Image (cartoon, rainbow, N blue to C red):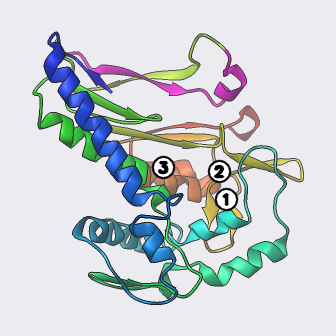
Amino acid sequence: MLVDSSRGQPAQAAASAVAACARQIEQKYSRYRDDNIVARINSSSGQPVEVDEETARLLDFAELAWRLSDGKFDITSGVLRRAWKFDGESRAPDAAQVRELMPLVGWSRVVWQRPFLTLLPGMEIDFGGIGKEYAVDQALAAATQLTTEPVLVNFGGDLAVSGPCRDGRPWRVGIESIGAADFAASAQPQASKLLELSAGALATSGDTYRFVNQAGERRSHILDPRTGEPVRGAPRSITVAAPTCTQAGLWCTLAMLEGQGAEALLDREGVRHWVQREPLDS
């Protein structure tokens, strides 16, 4: 997090608020914990679970994204991670493993009647597709309650700003190169482009660190919930600008799910974007 301020106390207070907000959201929505609302839902064995208002809003957003994407964006698809390991080294699972999981995927199989959510036994939800971006927006809101100085919140490359810098100039933000992983030991960060951001947010999705090699083909970590397979023809990286980080992240994912049609979707919807593909894919 960055605060453009000459006063240390407001900056420190804002930084503490951002850290506390990030910690609270991670504790509440991480799929890796066994003591939060996600764990309670995923272990419900077909019984309805009553959720709080914040979780209900996220479920409403997930359902809207599912409808707008014709089922391509689906928070029940996280169960496919039992088969797919996107560490750049593991081999792709065999088709039988994926087929066994497919009956557990599909928002259409979920009963969502506020404030009760009911999953079929064995089904799971995973807020990973929107959680980090939502945390950025919430953290920025928490920081701006404590300071009027310009703030930039950055969680792993997904970021939002409260406005321009104090001198009126925009923040300068780099888009990580798709070859960044090859330069991990370099003292200099590798950026493919520098952007100027005075308002709103940026989100990036890509396969620089999360991918699998399948029959010599590099496959992205973005899974199509309708097939259980990584999307074919997706760009190596997509960065999107939007009023909020949650919106930007959603557009990144929707575009990735379009594969070769990623740029066409973003162009058609008038979404400001930057796409990186391998030279041969250009």
The amino acid type found where label 3 is placed reads: Cys
Residue 245 forms part of the magenta stretch: no
Q: Secondary structure at mark 2?
A: loop
Q: Residue furthest right?
A: 215
Task: Return the x and y of residue 260 as percentages of the image width and height.
Answer: 64, 53
- Residue drawn at the location 88% of the way across and 47% of the way down: 216
Residue span colored magenta: 169-185
**On residue 156, which mark appears?**
none
Disc 1: which residue: 231
The one of 22 and 223 positioned closer to us in this rendering: 22
Task: Return the x and y of residue 248 as percentages of the image width and height.
Answer: 38, 47
- Residue drawn at the location 73% of the way across and 46% of the way down: 87
Q: Residue furthest front?
A: 35
Identify the image quadrant of residue 61: bottom left
The amino acid type found where label 2 is placed reads: Ala
Mark 3 and mark 1: span between their CA atoms? 13 Å
- Specify whether residue 120 is in view: yes
- Residue drawn at the location 28% of the way across and 36% of the way down: 18
Would you place residue 49 above or below residue 87 in this image? below
- Quadrant where the C terminus sits is top right
Q: Is residue 145 left or right of residue 89?
A: left
Q: Residues within 10 Å of mark 1 (few under 14, many from 20)?
A: many
Q: Are marks 2 and 1 in contact (CB under 8 Å)?
A: yes
The amino acid type found where label 1 is placed reads: Val
**On residue 234, which mark appears?**
2
Q: Residues within 10 Å of mark 2 (few under 14, many from 20)?
A: many
Q: Is residue 235 left or right of residue 17?
A: right
